[in-house]
Amino acid sequence: VPGAGAALRPCSSRVAQDGINRAVIDRIIRVDHAGEYGANRIYAGQMAVLGRSSVGPVIQQMWNQEKKHLKKFNELMVAYRVRPTVLLPFWNVAGFVLGAGSALLGKKGAMACTVAVEESISEHYNNQIRTLIEEDPEKYKELLQVIKQFRDEEQEHHDIGLEHDAEATPAYSVLKTAIQLGCKAAIYLSERI
Amino acid sequence: VRCQQYPPLRALQASAALRAASDEHKKEPWASSPQQHFESPPAGQQPEEKPQGPHPSYTGQGGQESEDYESEEQLQHRILTAALEFVPEHGWTAEAIAEGAKTLGLSVAAAGLFHSAGSELILHFVSDCNTKLSELLKKEQKLVQLGEAEKKPIDEFLRDAVEARLRMLIPYIEKWPQALSVLLLPRNIPSSLNLLTSMIDDIWHYAGDQSTEFNWYTRRAVLTAIYNTTELVMMQDSSPGFEDTWRFLENRVADAMTMSNTATQVQSTGEAVVQGLMGAAVTVSNAATSRAVR
């Protein structure tokens, strides 16, 4: 139901819908949107705890890039008329809790979380790129470009995390595995629900 | 526009194009068509382009089809459309389909093409109405884009869209309660739910909905409730021109707008209260610290 802040656009901004594989595109955009939404909340949680520390500016910069990613997927979601995942309110809370929780383990903990999440996301984007190329690289050119660019930026975040001593976190491999398992589950669910 | 009932078939588009082509070139010698169809790109590879010439039928035969060749889906579509005329008299039954088939010059046995005649006829009708609604909304949108019409406020848009869609039921209103109960049969629920949700999604899309959060679901749930309740009210309405129904619709849409405005107000009041409390807490802690220092 529209509220004062809801966006109502003046005209249709749809992408031409003929000939695209709706099932594949629906899933891709839905899960990517959920992913960027979650990533935003993770960085928000990290900033809430570490905002005034020395890594604050680094996290803020990565967060700003994620905000841009989310904005782009919001646009794509409207253009392709894709339904968002029902689990968004859940990812809202879970993302923030993960970000804040990892930040409470210290700066290295926050960086470890970043490394784990960004590695999962990069791998996930690579899978999608492969899927789209197998389908039809010409038809999905714009989407492929977006995903490739975002994958490169997530890879950068991953490298920044490593630079800031993520691997020196106590129980780094346990933490990383746990977070990546969580990411896999989130991806599986968001594609379907 | 998403057509829910029949999956898009290349043969369907080809048949439609065949009909258009045959209308223009009634005397065209079909013997030469194999040549033609190898020269022009087959429509199958580029479905968005208009097919240039004859296309191999889905049974794989060459270009020697007769001018009235059409796919089975198209034939079923035509029979069901013709059958609608007989629904007020015969209800949503195989009899109506048989009568419809007769008007097309087909045998009454054509009704045997349909396994569950009533359900298929009703689903066809609903799908048809939804398509008509989409086209109407698209046309209106074009007028607004061209500047020839004013953009409607959201409540008026929703009201008009739901009213337009419900008015399509008027010729069949006597038999519609029967149709509703058929649509609720367990085996029909997936299809009827599908048709309902895509219709509601269409209305919101043309209303300009750009939500990408949980709001997306809330909006559609509210509009579905409005549509369903208004439909039920319409079944029982005996006022002239269904004016009671339209008034009911107007009130429900107004309620929904109020609810959403209230929700926004509650949220911003809540945020303001939280900020106030945080400020108070900071002040108290500062006062306590400065007192402790003294």
Image (spheres, grey):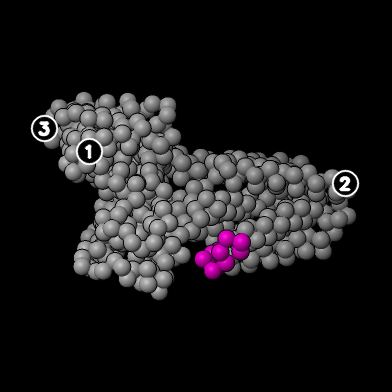
Dot 2: chain letter: A
Q: State the image quarter where residue B82 is shown.
A: top left
Range covered by the magenta-colored residues: A133-143
**x, y (%) of residue B207?**
34, 51
Q: Nearer the viewer, residue B62 or B179?
A: B62
Quadrant of the rendering where the C terminus of chain B is positioned: top right
- For the residue labelled by badge 2, is the local secondary structure a helix, a strand or a loop? loop
Residue positioned most to the left: B240
Q: Nearer the viewer, residue B233 or A142?
A: A142
How many C-alpha atoms fall within 10 Å of the one at disc 1: few (<14), some, or many (≥20)? few
Task: Tell me which residue sits at (70%, 59%) in the image.
Answer: A122
Q: Amino acid at mark 3?
A: Pro
Task: Tell me which residue sits at (70%, 46%) in the image.
Answer: A184
Residue highlighted by disc 3: B240
Residue A135 inside the magenta-drawn segment: yes
User: Which tag, 1 or 3, sits closer to the chain's start?
Assistant: 1
Q: State the image quarter where residue B246 is shown.
A: top left
> Are discs 1 and 3 both within one chain?
yes
Give the label on residue A171, or none: 2
Residue highlighted by disc 1: B107
Residue B256 inside the magenta-drawn segment: no
Q: State the image quarter where residue A90 is shown.
A: top right
Tag nearer the camera, 1 or 2: 1
**x, y (%) of residue A21?**
51, 55
Q: Nearer the viewer, residue B110 or A71?
A: B110
